[in-house]
Amino acid sequence: MAFIATRARAAVCRVATRAAHARAMATLHFTKDHEWVSVDGDSAVIGITQYAQDQMGDVVHVSLPDVGDELSVGDTLASIESVKAASDVYVPVDCVVNEVNGELDGNPGLVNESPEADGWFAKVSVKDASALADMMDEAAYRAFCEQH
Amino acid sequence: MRARVLLMPGWTLFEQLALEESLMRSSQEMWLLLSRPALPAPCTVVMGANAKPHEVLNVNEVLARSAPVIRRFSGGGTVAVDEGITLTSVIGSTLHVTDAGRFPPEIMRWSERLYKPAFARIGSGMHLLEHDYCIGQQKIGGNAQALARDRWVHHTSWIWDIHPSSLRLLTVPPKTPAYREERDHDSFVARVKDLAPAAMSRGRLERQVLAAMLSQFEPVGEGGQPLFENGEGPNEMATSLWDAALGLPGASRFLQAALQAARTAAEQVHAESSARKSNKVVSLADLQAAGSRK
């Protein structure tokens, strides 16, 4: 997502508790645009972070890609509508969409309630993992949020 | 910060929204826009990106009056645009408009600071109440945003005047701000002309709004060439640009040419843009389907 936080330096970047059992074998990566990518082998789950949802306000609609869509880094993964704003979220890795979170259709507020667990956007097959090298781990992301 | 100026470009509402989206997605420049859009019908309804017609429209009234309905690319609520509405837009960049922040709530608060001076002598002055521009407890303008990468659009419809029949095209939406307190449209919305001093014309208010925008952005032409080079203040620049846009006697031909060049440049960006084009005219079939859901 094309946002860089501008909160005061004292702001805390809270990273929500994850569904640990679901990600026991996965590695978490974070982008400067406040997306998280949970990678397990050739598969990944993508969403936006606690920090991002906190900054955006109440989410009222999420538009997701179609299953089967082939996306490249920088393509639009989703569009989030919060109060008064429609914001694009961009895919951080080359991938093919295997599944989208249908729960968000009737309950977009799930992105606010559980952005890093139940509010996931898409499950994908990673086609090129090289972009992961430019992403941050959780500690680096936390520090990034506190600095911006 | 430098910006191109689009002043009274003469586009229809749909054209303007389409151009705004293209300028956001495909231009690297910043743009300021103030317009009274050309309307194909007495009133056009503009819904937010994901609004449901049956929830926000008085569909039977819309159908009976053949009112055009547009689904725009930005979020936010539904507005009725008739001849009494003035539109302003800022197409900015998080890289350049650094004091607007990078998230919608911050951009909205920045916009309040931007426009507030234009309304200083009207009623108690304009302020942001929850997400709406208000004077007192009454809404005087609707606003919405779209964000893509480091670019954003913040646009506003200011209610100088609005016909009561235009408001009847809208229902009270399912979610309303708390300050609305279940008021109907007629009580919730205020016409700025009713609150402004008797001596204030619509044109004068529009020039004040333009001056407020120019207090934060330096107007430039092609290649970033400043349009003013003699230390003119925002009010003087706004008046000169206004006169040029309307072709008034004594207007600067240089500024007239610059405004035309900006319009042409914007249209060229749109024509050459391969980016997503999200604005849609809602079809009669979709409206009729919405009507049957009520």
Image (spheres, coloured by chain):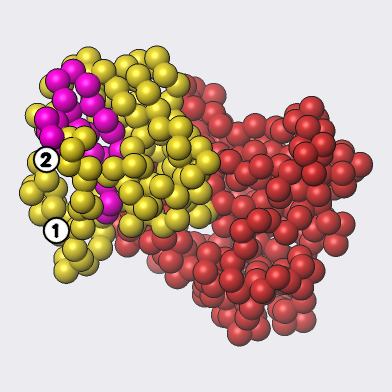
**Given the image, what chain letter belongs to the residue carrying mark 1?**
A
**Label 1 belongs to which residue?**
A147
Amino acid type, label 1: Gln
Viewer-side residue, B75 vs B192: B75
N-term mark: 1 or 2: 2
Q: Residue furthest right?
A: B64
Image depth: mark 1 or mark 2 in front: 2
For residue A29: magenta?
yes
Viewer-side residue, A17 vs B41: A17
Inter-mark Cα distance, 1 to 2: 14 Å
Question: Quick check: B287 left or right of A59?
Answer: right
Residue positioned 32% across, 46% down in the render: A115
Residue positioned 66% across, 68% down in the render: B140
Q: Are marks 1 and 2 in contact (CB under 8 Å)?
A: no
Residue B150 is drawn in which quadrant?
top left
Q: Mark 1 Cα within 10 Å, few/some/many (few <14, many 20+)?
A: some
Residue B88 pos. (x, y %): 58, 55
Residue B37 pos. (x, y %): 70, 46
Range of magenta residues: A24-51
Residue B146 pos. (x, y %): 47, 45
Give the position of the N terminus of chain B as an image quadrant: bottom left
Q: Is residue B195 above or below residue B207?
A: below
According to the rendering, which colour does chain B have? red
Residue positioned 87% across, 44% down in the render: B60
Q: Find residue A136 and name its label.
A: 2
Residue positioned 40% across, 32% down in the render: A101
**Given the image, what chain letter belongs to the residue carrying mark 2?**
A
Q: Residue furthest front?
A: A21
Question: Quick check: B34 left or right of A87?
Answer: right
Q: The chain shown in yellow is which?
A: A
Q: Is residue B242 above or below residue A117?
A: below
Give the position of the C terminus of chain B as an image quadrant: top right
